[in-house]
Each structure stands twice: as C-alpha cells, then as structure tokens.
Image (cartoon, helix red, strand yellow):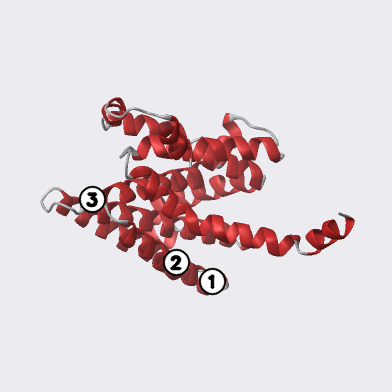
Amino acid sequence: METVGLVLQSSKMYILSALFFVANTLRVPLAAAAVQPLRTPGVHCFFHLIPAAIAIWATRDLGSISLKTLRGSAVPVSLSGIQVGCLFAALVADSIWLVLPWLVLMRQIVGFQRRYLSSNGTLSLPVVSVLACGVCTVALGAAAFVVPGMLGFLCLMVWTTAECGRVAWELASLQDQSHPLDLGAWAGSRGEAVGALMQDQIARQSKLPQAALDFYQSAVPAVPLLLLGLLCLEGKELVQHELSVPAVELLCW
C-alpha cells in the first residue's frame, strides 16, 4: 500500500489533469443530455450553479462575504450569468453539434485575441469586438422574430458578446494596474466619467480573493436565472413531467 501511495503521489498532477480534461470535455454533452428530456434551461442553470457554489464555499477560504464585496464582482458575475444562461438556452433551442463547435472556435479566437493584446496594453480591438458582436446580436434578435429556428444562433451570439466583454474587462483591469484608464479622448466628459467608474469597479474587484469571485460567479446568477426560467413558463414544463429519481439526478448533472 505504501508503494501504491507513493506512485499515486508522484503522478497526482497527471491524474488531476486527466480528470479535469475529461470533466471539462463532458460538461457540454452532459448539459445537452440533461436539457433534451426536460427543456427547462433556467432550472438547469440553477441546479448547475448551486452545487458549484456550495463546493467552493465548503472547500475554499472566501474571506468576507457581504454586499460591499459583492459589488466589486458585479461585472464578472453579470457576464458569467449571461454566458451560463445562453449556453443552456442554446442547447435547448439547437443541436449540440452546432453549440459545441461554436464554443470551441470562439474560445480559441477570443483567447488568441487576449494573448495577442495582453502585452500591448490596448483596449481598441476588444471594444470593437464587443461592439461588432453586439450589432450582430441585435440583428439576430430582430431576425429571430421573423425566421423560425434563429433562437439558438441568437443565444450563441449573446454568449460570444459576453465572452468578448469578459476579455475586454480583463484587459482593462491589467491596463489599470499599469496606468489609469483614459477614455476622455474617446468620448469627452462622458468617457472620463465612464473611465472613473471603471477604475473604481476594478479597484473593488482587485481587493477580492479569487475564491470569493468564483463563489459569487456561481451563487449570484443562480436565482435570477431560475426566476427568468419560471417567468418563461418552465414551471408548466416541470408539471407536465413526472420527476422520477433518475430525472432529478439528470437535473443535478
């Protein structure tokens, strides 16, 4: 047993890396399998986020949890909630064979953009990306009311806009650490006011430990997404199904 323990200890990093890779790979297929028999994305988001929040709360030191610290996480929490909600909604509205390649491709493109620009200290390209994705989202939103079957594309476009916004916010945080943001040249006095607000928000977020930020990103969007789902008549979908034990287990995945 001692030999086995030594072998496991020496290869712990490889085992954990393999488990992380497998879990991350199966996350979207399992979510797609969960939403197909019970098409309730808001309820699924709730059951997806709450266990993660409980696990973070139980295993990591969160520091001080209060409304004041919650305010510092407002931007990443909002973007994370939008992405989770859009992901499950896209899996309900469209096929996983569209959603999964879209996620992989867009993450690679946005990740390349972040790596390329992180050393340049510029926000121009991320801001342009956010604006371009926003325009495409508005166009798809208008088309979704006319052309059936566009809801999945709309959700994926909103997800992409939020991902670009997340990268732009990360780069803004890095730029603020080196020198203050100056948006006055872009939009005059309004730009200066927005820059001051961003600097204040970045300063608040920088004081948060990463564990607290992860906890907020999992815990805070859960209830709003559940309420949004119930407003979209997901409760009717739940009533029409007999929630057996296997169904509840599938929800908790």
Q: Residue extending furthest right? A: 2
**Lateral position of residue 122 relative to residue 247, left or right:** right
Q: What residue type is labelled 2?
A: Val
Per the image, the residue denoted by label 3 is 151
Q: Distance between the residues labelled 3 and 2?
A: 23 Å
Which amino acid type is shown beneath numbered disc 1?
A: Arg
How crowded is the residue under tag 2: few (<14 C-alpha within 10 Å), some, or many (20+)?
Answer: some
Dot 3, how many residues are within 10 Å of its Cα: few (below 14), some (14-19), or many (20+)? many
Q: What element carries label 1?
A: helix
**Chain-order first, disc 3 or disc 2:** 2
Label 3: state its secondary structure. helix
Left or right of 90, for residue 138 = left
Disc on res. 177:
none
Q: Looking at the rendering, in which quadrant would you find the N terminus?
A: bottom right
Circles 3 and 1: CB atoms closer than 8 Å? no
Whether residue 123 is visible here, answered yes or no, is: yes
Q: Which residue is drawn at 48% across and 60% down?
A: 167
Q: Which of marks 3 and 1 is in front?
A: 3
Q: Position of residue 223 (x, y in %)?
A: 44, 31
Where residue 140 appears, x then y in whole percent?
21, 55
Number of other residues with Cα within 10 Å of mark 1, as a class: few under 14, some 14 to 19, many 20 or more: few
The residue beneath circle 2 is 110
User: At 60% across and 61% down in the image, what residue appears?
Assistant: 179
Task: Please name the residue that numbered disc 1 is placed on.
Answer: 115
Q: What element carries label 2?
A: helix
Question: Mark 3 or mark 1: which comes first in sequence?
Answer: 1
Q: Position of residue 155 (x, y in %)?
A: 30, 51
